Amino acid sequence: MKFSLNSNGKINIGLNVTGVLSNGYHLLDMIMVPISLSDRITGEIEDISGTLEIKTNKADIPVNEDNILWKIYDKFYSESGLSKRKISLYLEKIIPHQAGLGGGSSNGAFLLKLLNEFHGNFFSQERLIEIGKSVGADIPFFLINKSARVRGIGEDIEIIENNLKNSIILIKPQFGVSTGKAYKNMSMLNNKRDANIDKIIFGLKDNRVDIVEDNIENHLEQGLLLEDENIIEFRKKLAELNMKFFMSGSGSAYYTFVTQEESEEAVTRIKEYLNSCEVYLCSSL
């Protein structure tokens, strides 16, 4: 069976860290929105025993057991007890990594859904979420892949209504951010500013981008701004554009909302000013 998957990314619209478990996992309360920027996964599943072969367009992406696709492949077959099938796939990475856009988790979720469908929907949706959660915290969201309020360690997903008409411009600087460092820095904050998740939900439902923007905060960004020189300096450059920018997840990508009418001009202006950055125009799904 040949397949072709568009594995989309996400942005976080507000992110509060609400606690930490004894195992070190942080509890979150945030809005996650799927976006049109996507990786492409193509390949073939053969109905014979075999293993997984990964090829990709990015030299710095592992193609062995360290790749999340490998982890999902192994986990699905170990949990199902089915014989591993021979799969060859090509991963065309477009979503920047170390950016807070969930590209790797999306890749894993889309492969997990594909394997489940190939084997006749072997697992229920609820069981898939459990399997996905054991591999990556954002995978359950991408299994559902709708705008949602996400709580806990990523498994408590409440679908919300998103009628926002604005386009989204993503900006990825040349540097990345370690998720571990973002959480470590956040723990040093004395006066966190909380996102008002309820008001963001209202703004998304009523297509009120002003309400959405006024209530976005990100605890992880606040922590990074304490001492991460890359983020501090990049934030200063963004401020010079006189637009409202927000970090997605643990960064380093930022996004801004623009009307469809002004989107092309805004993209051109941002590319000219931040010519070393990757800039993408996309929309919510």
Image (cartoon, rainbow, N blue to C red):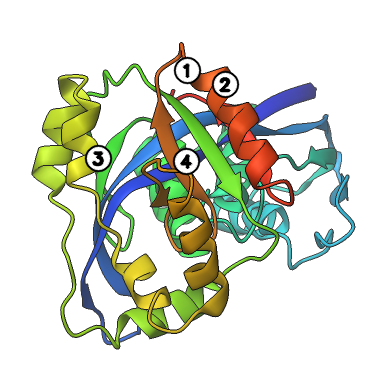
Residue 222 x/y as whole percent: 32, 71
Name the residue tied to disc 2. Answer: 265
Seen in the image, is 134 located left or right of residue 1?
left
Residue 158 appears in the picture as rendered: no
Name the residue tied to disc 4. Answer: 10
- Quadrant of res 201: top left
Label 2: how many Cα within 10 Å (few below 14, some 14–19, many 20+): few
Mark 2 vs 4, N-terminal side: 4
Residue at 61 percent across and 50 percent down: it is 172
Mark 4 vs 3, N-terminal side: 4
Seen in the image, is 14 located left or right of residue 194?
right
Tell me if label 2 and label 4 are in contact, CB under 8 Å.
Answer: no
Mark 4 vs 1, N-terminal side: 4
Eye-nearest disc, 2 or 4: 2
Residue 21 x/y as whole percent: 25, 80
Q: Amino acid at mark 1?
A: Glu
Residue 106 appears in the picture as rendered: yes
Label 4: how many Cα within 10 Å (few below 14, some 14–19, many 20+): many
The quadrant the N terminus occupies is top right
Eye-nearest disc, 4 or 3: 3
Give the alpha-carbon distance from disc 4 to disc 1, as whole Å: 22 Å
Give the alpha-carbon distance from disc 3 to disc 2, as whole Å: 21 Å
Seen in the image, is 61 located left or right of residue 229?
right
Residue at 38 percent across and 36 percent down: it is 33
Give the alpha-carbon distance from disc 2 to disc 1, as whole Å: 6 Å
Label 1: state its secondary structure. Answer: loop
Label 1: how many Cα within 10 Å (few below 14, some 14–19, many 20+): few
Mark 1 vs 3, N-terminal side: 3
Name the residue tied to disc 1. Answer: 262
Q: Amino acid at mark 2?
A: Glu
